[in-house]
Amino acid sequence: MPMFVNSIVLKKFRNYETLDLGFSSGINVIVGPNGSGKTNILEAVSVAANIRSFRGAADADMVKWGEESYFCRLTLSGSAFKELEIGYSSVPGTTRKKAKVDGCEIHRASDYFGRLLTVIYSPGDTLIISGSPEVRRRFFDAIIARVDREYLPLIGEFKKILASRNRLLKALLEKRTRVSELDVWDEMLATSSSGIVNKRMDFLESFTPSFIGAYQRIAKQDGVPVLRYHGTLGEGSVYEIREKISASRRRDIAAGMTTAGPHRDDYVLYHENGRPFSSCSSQGQKRTASIALKNAERLFIEKATGERVVLMVDDVFSELDPERRENIVDSLQGDNQVIFTMVNTGSIDLANFCGARIFNVGSRGIIS
Amino acid sequence: MPMFVNSIVLKKFRNYETLDLGFSSGINVIVGPNGSGKTNILEAVSVAANIRSFRGAADADMVKWGEESYFCRLTLSGSAFKELEIGYSSVPGTTRKKAKVDGCEIHRASDYFGRLLTVIYSPGDTLIISGSPEVRRRFFDAIIARVDREYLPLIGEFKKILASRNRLLKALLEKRTRVSELDVWDEMLATSSSGIVNKRMDFLESFTPSFIGAYQRIAKQDGVPVLRYHGTLGEGSVYEIREKISASRRRDIAAGMTTAGPHRDDYVLYHENGRPFSSCSSQGQKRTASIALKNAERLFIEKATGERVVLMVDDVFSELDPERRENIVDSLQGDNQVIFTMVNTGSIDLANFCGARIFNVGSRGIIS
């Protein structure tokens, strides 16, 4: 039996004074008007799974208005452990956050992560397509880090090299040192960059077929999308990267910082005809692509871990046409537990969800 | 009779080889699946009204795939002129863009702007709430500029002063000049900043009631939102601003740039209880706030110009609950011409739209 969230208990979290919900192991649908607190439930699950909010919210913002602490407990089935708890409290002078597994406090975040695997489909996901390169790097870096334990240390090392080289470039701008000082840093930058770019390119090669499959399952008529890595230092070999670093040295010195490298690279999505999605696609196509990226992410994590991911789908259907909606619901169906939120059940054919558990949230956050 | 768009003719624009549509002076609804080209029609109207795409697209991206030029003609009623045309062509070596009013070419953009007033409600508008301060400054600056002819020159002057002061700060960082050189620039910066901040604060005072009214008309249960100006140099008086500039001088010199001023100020939206919308509101509440901002913008422009604005509503309903949808449709009703796009008419009660003209777009962009 795949892992799933059996129940959630919330105290003083967002708009909930208390909440105690039992989930179905299959499809769950949370229905309610805007601002009633549907997404807050998904956020609580994500906090319990990943310590942090998927919306990037500060803990203080998740505490119910006028209170000083929040608490969130998940009970699980199909896993080696039964209970995840996150508690946060902030009174003037002391702020505490505790994470517990089966009642035992966990002191290192890395011992907590990865116990409950979640993927969240949320309205802001289209920014992966149309937002800044940083948004895309963050999205892909997070997936690579989940399936390759060497990747995060490599990124950490690169950041240190980059910071040192940038300090040196700033000193050069102010004529406080000599250009030859750069040599050793350029070499380290080349080796480190090549390591990262190679991992990214390898990853993209295995990720792309899953992504294309996921996209075409939703909208075959759109053609085959192309996902490409744009390396500001070329695309992989240390030799090429070394050449490009030395070619951009003058520009780097003039700018007082490293102008090219993995920290400036981008992943770009194109239509079959070669036009970029960011400027040549409709809102619905961007939505389709972002859902396909998430579907591919989920397949990737499941393959790497051998575990099932809990899927949380935060009202991403609304701007899609009926055919795409159908196809997405189909592509989410499986053994996975899924928690949907929607403003009304009319946006989806509930007949598809045999045995789904429906939760109605009132305008004051009361659940029936 | 208020101004309205009678018909639109497109050639080689986005997915349209040719398109010739006659609009109703009241409600128009463009219905079709994702990627069929609904938004492209609104984009064409916005290009003809404002020379530029409301999506920020490059002209080359608006040319139909494989072609070299696009053309867009609007015929209008209820106005002193009858026809607006925009043509763009790009062959290797020459790129041309022409704007014509009643067949006569217009050479200065400022002679073209403002002839057809439009407000576009689009899915990306929630970024006005949750995006960077720059997005908000751009939104409000554009409205102020539309109703106050002194505002843009003031901003232009400020930018020059800022650039000069930044050059000086950079020279100071490199020890190429003396600190006393800053005095004259600080004084100019204070006067210019104060002028801008005062205009912004005055504007906000008259804008806020329209905004609150518009918000409450959509969602009374959310309470009274508060819109506040966050001035990095205080909020208006030259005296205070001068003090703050001199207090931040050391920081500015260390950073090599001007760290506070109207170019760093922000507008922040709060709930009645004081929590910011950006981190403490649902997607639906952000949507509601962004539509209310646009409604207030429209009222402002209509009051300032005595003209009616053509409203284009690009599928912003989908994530809203039925009550908010109803309320928005009510608040858009009036003498104005409205062009809606939606993936299916089910998202709105068409009975509200008596006499609406419905256009069905097929998956290949063919309109019936």
Image: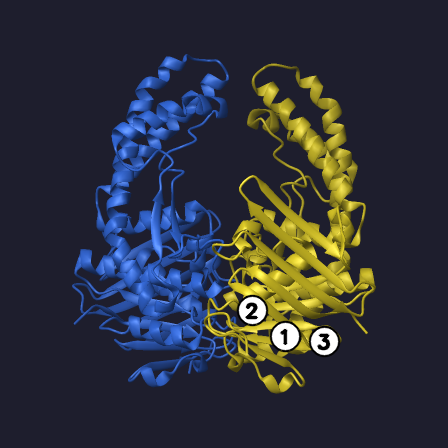
Chain colours: A blue, B yellow
Mark 3 vs 2, N-terminal side: 3
Helix or strand or loop: what does disc 2 sit on? loop
Q: Are marks 1 and 2 in contact (CB under 8 Å)?
A: yes
Is B193 placed left or right of B1 in the picture?
A: left
Q: Which residue in the protein does label 3 denote?
A: B25
Q: Are marks 3 and 2 in contact (CB under 8 Å)?
A: no
Mark 1 vs 2, N-terminal side: 2
Q: Residues within 10 Å of mark 3 (few under 14, many from 20)?
A: many
Given the image, on which type of amino acid does mark 2 rest?
Val
Q: Which residue in the protein does label 1 denote?
A: B328
Chain where mark 1 sits:
B
Given the image, on which type of amino acid does mark 1 rest?
Ile
Is A254 placed left or right of B121 in the picture?
A: left
Establish if B165 lies above or below B16. Answer: above
Q: Position of residue A262 (x, y in %)?
A: 35, 37
Q: Visible in this render: residue B272? A: no
Q: Where is residue A340 in the image (x, y as percent from the top left)?
A: 37, 73
Q: Position of residue B159 (x, y in %)?
A: 69, 36
Is B203 placed left or right of A50 in the picture?
A: right
B281, A129: nearer the viewer: A129
Q: Residue A283 carries which label?
A: none
Given the image, on which type of amino acid does mark 3 rest?
Ser
Q: Which residue in the protein does label 2 denote?
A: B316
Chain where mark 3 sits:
B
Residue at 55% of width from left, 55% of height from top? Answer: B62
